[in-house]
Structure formats: C-alpha cells, structure tokens
C-alpha cells in the first residue's frame, strides 16, 4: 500500500447536528491554506456507493443487511477515493464514516458491536481517521432542526424519520466512541451559533495540519 501522507478527517453526529453545514466551509478554509481537499460522504462517494446510499436511505431491509451494505459501500470508497487521495497527500473530509455504523446500526438498530468491529478490522483496520468531529446536540434540538427542514419542503429519509429514543441510542454510542478514542475525537457543542462552532473547528484543523 502506498504511504499515507494526507489527512483523514471525518464528521459525525446525529441527523440535523450540523455536519453538512460545515463541510463546504472547511473545504474553502483548507484550500485557502494551500491544501488539496477531497470532500466526500458515506454512505456514498463512488458510483456504486451512491446507488447503495439510495437503497440504504429509502428501502426497508434487515439491520444486518444495512450494516453489511454500509461496509460494502465503504470498501469501494476506501479503495477508489479515500486511500488514493491520502497517498497523494490530500486532505479527505468525509461526512460520516465507520463511527456512524457503530452509532446507527449498532446503537440505533442493535447490530452487535462485536460484529461491526470485525467488519471494521477487515475493511479498514489499517486506516483510521486522524481526526473526527462529533457534532453534538440534544436529540430535541436535532428534531427541531429536521422538522423545520421538512416544513421548508425537504423530504426526510428513513433515518431522519426515526423516533427520539432511536436518536438517544445513537447519540450515546457516539459519546462512548468519543470516550474510547479521545486521541482522534473532538466533541463539538453544535448548539452554539455557527460562527462559534467554526472558530473551534479552525483550531482543531490547525493543530492537525501542524502534526
Ligand atoms: N450551529 C447551528 N445553529 C443553528 N442551526 C444550525 C446549526 N448548525 C446547523 N444548523 C441547521 O440545522 C439543520 C441541519 O444541519 P445539517 O444539514 O448541517 O445537519 P447534518 O448533521 O448534516 O444532518 P444529516 O445527518 O441529516 O445530513 C440545517 O437547517 C442547518 O442550517
Ligand atoms: Mg448532512
């Protein structure tokens, strides 16, 4: 495998926490600092991955199938997009990655965490994010944001329509992941105004660039 010289940054959090709100801004900021940046998302990021995304976000399926398809999409994404970009020395910004599978399929849907760990080891045991922003909001805040988006005409996907208890479980697994991997997780209080959140992101990104 080619040597990894880029930086791998993932954005996580429950639906409506604010991940997408900051991706474009982060890209602009990093590019202005002279970095080559690839912004991508999961599930998705490749032609097959985007097809799988459509199925995953719309179609009913067993929870195990959901976890397996997430990792099928991830394998394509890693081999075709993420690893090549890192080998070229680029920054990869990924809107959701494996922490989301632990949180949603594990916490939300009850797929055994050990099974997800096995898949993680198989598919990318050697390639972990350098930094993970966990955009954190109480589930009531995320619900209010999603309801507003829906009232403005955006159709909510299968996960966004889940009940509060589901999001409580997802959030608590995210918190557990952050405690288990403090070296790469930064928990961002995303109830604050966008500018305050961005000031904090800028500090963390500068520290990663200097590593
Ligand atoms: N700090 C903030 N303060 C107030 N509103 C915010 C903040 N961050 C994001 N929002 C709003 O919350 C809504 C959801 O944000 P966004 O789409 O970025 O969330 P997301 O984490 O990407 O959600 P999803 O997982 O569903 O893609 C948007 O309407 C956005 O404008
Ligand atoms: Mg989003």
Image: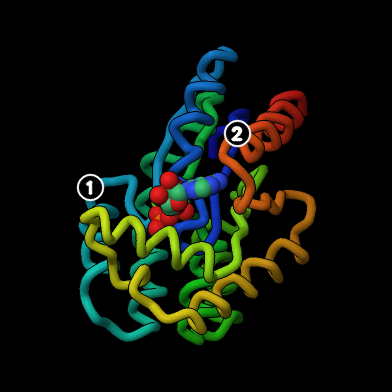
User: For mark 1, what is the residue?
Assistant: 47
Image quadrant where one finds the C terminus: top right
Position of 121 relative to 184 (above/below): below
Q: Position of residue 173 (x, y in %)?
A: 63, 73
The image shows a total of numbered marks equal to 2
State left or right for residue 204 relative to residue 12.
Answer: right
Mark 2 — residue?
195
Mark 1 Cβ and ligand 2 under 8 Å apart: no
Residue 203 visible in the displayed image = yes
Residue 74 in sight:
no
**Depth check, front residue: 78 or 182:** 182
Where is residue 178 shown, x and y percent of the image?
Answer: 71, 61
Relative vertical location of residue 44 with respect to residue 70 in this rendering, above or below: above
Q: Is residue 5 left or right of residue 149?
A: right
Residue at 47 percent across and 31 percent down: it is: 85
Work out which quarter of the rendered image holds the N terminus and state it.
top right
Mark seen at residue 139 = none
């Amino acid at each position: 495998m080619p040597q990894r010289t880029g930086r791998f940054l993932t954005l996580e959090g429950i639906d409506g926490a604010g991940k997408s709100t900051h991706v474009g801004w982060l890209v602009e900021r990093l590019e202005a600092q002279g970095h080559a940046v690839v912004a991508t998302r999961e599930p998705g990021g490749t032609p097959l991955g985007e097809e799988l995304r459509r199925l995953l976000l719309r179609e009913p399926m067993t929870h195990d199938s959901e976890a397996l398809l997430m990792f099928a999409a991830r394998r394509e994404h890693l081999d075709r997009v993420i690893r090549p970009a890192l080998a070229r020395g680029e920054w990869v910004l990924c809107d959701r990655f494996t922490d989301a599978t632990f949180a949603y399929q594990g916490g939300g849907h009850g797929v055994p965490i050990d099974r997800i760990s096995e898949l993680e080891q198989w598919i990318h045991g050697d390639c972990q994010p350098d930094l993970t922003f966990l955009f954190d909001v109480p589930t009531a805040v995320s619900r209010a944001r999603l309801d507003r988006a829906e009232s403005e005409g955006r159709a909510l996907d299968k996960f966004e329509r889940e009940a509060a208890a589901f999001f409580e479980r997802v959030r608590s697994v995210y918190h557990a992941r952050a405690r288990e991997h403090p070296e790469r997780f930064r928990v961002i209080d995303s109830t604050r105004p966008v500018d305050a959140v961005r000031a904090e992101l800028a500090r963390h990104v500068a520290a990663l660039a200097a590593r």
